[in-house]
Image (spheres, rainbow, N blue to C red):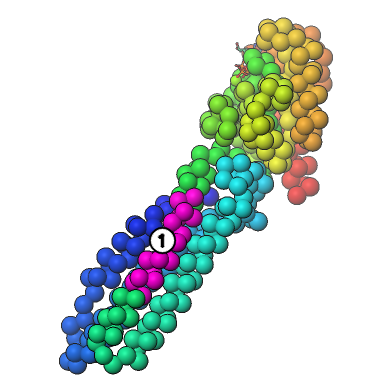
Amino acid sequence: MRQIPTILRSDEIINKSLRKASKIEEPYDKVFENRIRKENIDRIATVESVAAPYLMKIVKKFPAIEKMHPFYEDFIDLKFGVDNYKIALSNVQWAGQKLVELATENINQLKRSKKTFEMVNIRKRYYGRFCSVIEGIEKDLLLLGECRDFLKTLPEINPDQPTFIIAGMPNVGKSSLLNSLTRNDVKTAPYPFTTQSVYIGHMMEEDVRVQLVDTPGILDRPMAERNELERRSILSLRDIKGIILFLMDYSGTSGYSVEQQMNLYEEIRKTFHKKVFKIQAKIDISQKQEDIAISTYTGEGIEQLRNFIFINAGEIIGQQ
Ligand SMILES: Nc1nc2c(ncn2[C@@H]2O[C@H](COP(=O)(O)OP(=O)(O)OP(=O)(O)O)[C@@H](O)[C@H]2O)c(=O)[nH]1
Ligand SMILES: [Mg+2]
C-alpha cells in the first residue's frame, strides 16, 4: 500500500507526454514523406508509451477493493465511498486501454497515408483525442491522489497478524503494560476519524510475531459518546484478527470505579465479537481478583501474560 506512486494531475500527464513527443525528429530518411510519416508515428507512439503504462501502473499499484483487507476497506469507504474508489480505478484503466487503441488506429492510418499534410493532421487529431481522454479522468485522478495520501496515514496494523488490543479506561496502566511487554519499542500513528492515536508494538517468540495495540481514547469510553464517523472507525477494529486484553484497575488509583470499568468491559464484549480477557493491572497495590494479574512496577504476572499471549497467538494462527 505504501508503494503507490504519486498521482499526476491530468494536465501534468498531458504536458509530460506531449513534451517528450515534441522532441522527436527523424533526420534519417532521404524521402521527405517517409521522414514525416516516421516522425508522426514516433510522436504518437511516444505519447502513448508515456501515458498508457503510467495509467496502468496506477491501476496495478492501488489495491483492488476485493483484495483489500476489510480493516482498510472500512476506512476507504468512510472517507471516499467504496463505489467511488472502484469507479475511479476502472475509469483510469479504461483510459489506459483507450490510449493504446487510439494510438494503434492512428498509426495504422499514418502507415497508409501518402500526403504529408494528412499525416500531420492524423497526428494532431490523435493529440486532441489523447487530451480529451486524459481530461476525462481528471476527477478520478484527483480522487486517487487523495486516496493515496489517505492510505499512507492509516496506522500500520497488519490485519493478518495475531493482534492483541489493549483496552481499558483511562489511567489503568495500558501504556505501561505495552511498554513493558515490548521493551519500549512502540510506534504511534493517528487513528483515522478520531482525535486519538494508537500505539503499536510487537513481540516475537520463536517464529511467532504478534502485534500489540494500545488504544488510548478509543476503547476507553462508551460508544454512545461517539459521533457516527468515530463509531464506525472504531468498529473497524472488529475486522482485525485477535483478542482484546481488557485492563481492570481495582486499586482505585485510576479514578474509575469497578462498576464503570465493568460496564465498559461488557460493552466492548458485546460490540466487538471478539474474545475479551480481563487482565488485572497494578497488582502491587490491589487484591488479586483475576486469573492474570500484573504489575509493571514489580514485574509480577508479566511472564504469565506473555505466555498467555503466545498460546492464544498460536491458536489464532492455527485457525487461519
Ligand atoms: N502501582 C502501579 N502503578 C502503575 C502500574 N502501571 C501503571 N501505573 C501507573 O498508573 C498511571 C497510568 O498508567 P498509564 O500506563 O499511563 O495508563 P494508561 O491506561 O495508558 O492511561 P491513558 O493513556 O491515559 O488511558 C501512571 O501513573 C503509572 O505510573 C502498576 O503496575 N502499578
Ligand atoms: Mg496511555
Residue 14 shows in this picture: yes
Instruction: Give the residue at x 38% y 69%.
Output: 130
Q: Is residue 276 left or right of residue 36?
A: right
- Return the x and y of residue 159 as percentages of the image width and height: 65, 43
Residue 233, placed above or below residue 27: above
Quadrant housing residue 281: top right
Quadrant housing residue 116: bottom left
Residue 280 shows in this picture: no
Q: Is residue 250 left or right of residue 117?
A: right
Instruction: Give the residue at x 24% y 70%.
Output: 22
On whether residue 271 falls in the magenta region, the answer is: no
Q: Is residue 141 left or right of residue 14?
A: right
Q: How many marks?
A: 1
Residue tagged by mark 1?
A: 135
Q: Main secondary structure of the magenta part?
A: helix
Instruction: Give the residue at x 57% y 45%.
Output: 80
Element under disc 1: helix
For ligand 1, give the image quadrant.
Answer: top right
| Residue range (magenta) | 126-143
The amino acid pointed to by label 1 is Glu
Residue 223, placed above or below residue 108: above
Residue 264, placed above or below residue 208: above
